[in-house]
Image (cartoon, coloured by chain):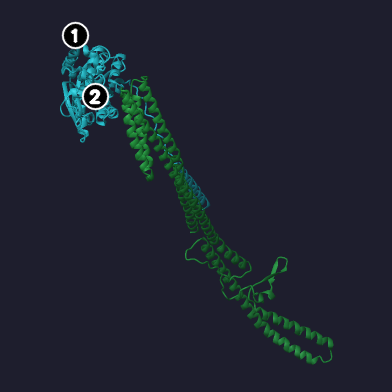
Chain colours: A cyan, B green
Amino acid sequence: MITTARAVATGGILLTTAILCWLWLAPIAAPPGPPPPGRQKSAIFRLGLIPDRNLYDQRKAYRALGDYLETHVHVSRGASTIADNPPLHIELVTSSNYEGILRDFTGGDVDGAFLGSLVAALAIDRCRAQVLLKSENQAGQNTYAGVIFVPQSSPAHTLADLAGKKMAAVRTTTAGAIFPVYAYQQAGLQSALPAVIWSGTHDDAIEEVAAGRADAGAVKDLRLDLYEHAHPGVSFRRLSTGPRVPDGAFVVDRRLSPDVRDAIVATLLHMNDNPDAKPVLDKMSLSRFVPCEASEYAPLYDMIETLGPNWPAAGVEGSPPRRPGVK
Amino acid sequence: MLRRKFMLFLGSLLIMLVLASIVSIYLLQGVLGEMDHAATQDGAILQTANTMTDSITDIEIELREVQLGNARHLDRLLDLVGTLKDQTDQFGREYERPIPQARDRYLAIVSALDVFQHHVAMLATVEDESLSRAHTAEAIGASITLRQEILCVARIMRQHTTAEEHAAIDHFRWIVLGIAIGFLVLINTSLLVLYRMATMVTAPVEKLVEASRRLAHEEFTFRVHLPGRHQDEFNELAAAYNQLAERLQASERRKLETLMQTAIMLNHELNNASAIIKLQIQLLRRQSTGNDAFERGLRQINESLERMTRTVESLKRVRRIVLTTYTAGTQMLDLEKSTMEFTENEDAPDARKAV
């Protein structure tokens, strides 16, 4: 009996000790360990962005596109020196202005970018970049036109009425820099060209007009349409609209590995066929990407050639871009 | 049976102690968790507020670098703004819900952040100086509002956590008091249980010791009766004792009966002889007139005869057999003690009393 009692007592003490230890240690959870480092080297694609609307929304939209490309682009080795089927990593590089992206192309800081027409033409001319695709919005438009506009309440009804006024625009853009000069030149009103307030993005230029800090604006018509759609109480009068040029062109550095370039282009072209891409395209307010040729920029080159010696009035640094194939 | 009882009592005590310990640790861990949460939250609030104001400063520095042309890319600036927005969201998620009075202040932070980030974006890209000045003024205003509101929310939250700390300390005091009272009750219960267990052993042992003592005094009529319906080891021992006493009593009774029969027989035989001797002594006394020596001899014979008659008579009054040493190695009946009544501490021979 003593042996049994001793065994019971010992068991009880051990059980009690175990329960108390468990209770004491139970809340302590081991922190999750770091994931094992990947052994495969990534192919890095630096995607350049230029501010053309709300910077944060734009970055979120392109980050979503980058994430989509990272999971859907399959890079084959081909002639490249990167590893077999390397994972693709997309880095976003946001330039502070339109001229900055040209410096990024020149300096090799970006491998590709989504660009407006003038910067794309400058990149093709000055950086030997290659235009591959353009963006098509959810209304089926893949081109845009520059538009000069005033608030609906403005007394200005013609371009001449803006003489001595302030016009908000974005430097180094077709809509903000080339088209106003072109429009006033075509109207024979070079001297009536309003003073330009250089905003950072088309959306900012529209907001400056809406806020009354500028009398008129010169922006992409697509951005103006979206702004009016998003702000039903705000209405603008369009005084002049220019010729249409490709919108949101995907331009790449010619030094980019053909494997990476082709894989990305193929994925972008088929995004509209993939249900996974729908939320990404929605974020970008696009329906799909379509092929684009340098020749589609002919209306831009026409405007630039029309400016002729009046090119410096556009406020773009350096010489005007030449048509592809012209030496 | 006794072992089962002990196991039941000890097991119950053990279970009560374990349960009390578990409940105590659970309650203490809960209140310590509350105190730890309050302390951690207090530190976290300060840290989050500092981190948010640091982020605002970092944004301002990076914006200045962009404006001066030292930074060509806006990614770091956008990341910093995104980080500040995430920190604000986290600030709201963690503290605004449990602290309703901070809600208005938090909404002011969110509003000021929207204004701030809007003008930061404008300033990062705008090239016109007049626009830049206008946006700078608004951005600075929003930045100041942000800092003020962050500090205000942090202050409200610190008050809240201080109140939580005090509540946790009060809770802790009550729990400690409750545990102390609980363990006092448990200790008292344990003492009662242990006393009961000791009684379960000592009470029957005392009765058995008393019975053994009486047996040693040849009091064979004594019996042990233990309370309780269940048969345990002590009941078995008491039963064995009672059986032994029964047998000894029966043996003693048989001896007494034999002795009594012998006494009757001797009484019968000696009475006859004694009557003849007494008759002859009377005849001899009549014939020995005036002879003193003869008279004295007859008187001594008569006294011896009477003593012998009394001895035989007393044999009939033997109540028990008490021996005494006659010669070395030989014992004889102690007639005086054997005929004595039981003392006041002893039971009557025929009465069966039980403890």
Identified by mark 2, the residue type is: Lys
CB under 8 Å between callouts 2 and 1? no
> Where B148 sits versus A83, above or below?
below
In the picture, the quarter occupied by the C terminus of chain B is bottom right
Of the image marks 2 and 1, the number of the one nearer the N terminus: 2
Which is more toward the observer, B212 or B304? B212
Instruction: Say if residue A302 shows up in the picture.
Output: yes
The residue carrying pointer 1 sits among few (fewer than 14), some (14 to 19) or many (20 or more) residues within 10 Å by Cα, namely few
Would you call the spot at circle 2 few (<14 residues within 10 Å), some (14-19), or many (20 or more)? some
Circle number at residue A326: 1
Does residue B86 appear to the left or right of A254 in the view shown? right
Label 2 chain ID: A
Give coordinates of residue A260: x percent, y percent.
25, 18
Q: Quadrant of residue B145?
A: top left
Which of the 4 image quarters holds residue A241? top left
Q: Where is residue A32? Give x, y as percent.
A: 39, 33
Could one spot residue A142 in this view of the protein?
Answer: no
Residue A195 drawn at (x, y percent) = 25, 21
Residue A122: image tag: none
Please tell me whether residue A152 is drawn above or below residue A143 in the rendered image. below
| Disc 1 secondary structure class | loop
Chain letter of mark 1 equals A
- At label 1, the amino acid type is Val
The quarter of the displayed image where residue A113 is located: top left
Mark nearest the camera among 2 and 1 is: 2
Residue bearing mark 2:
A165
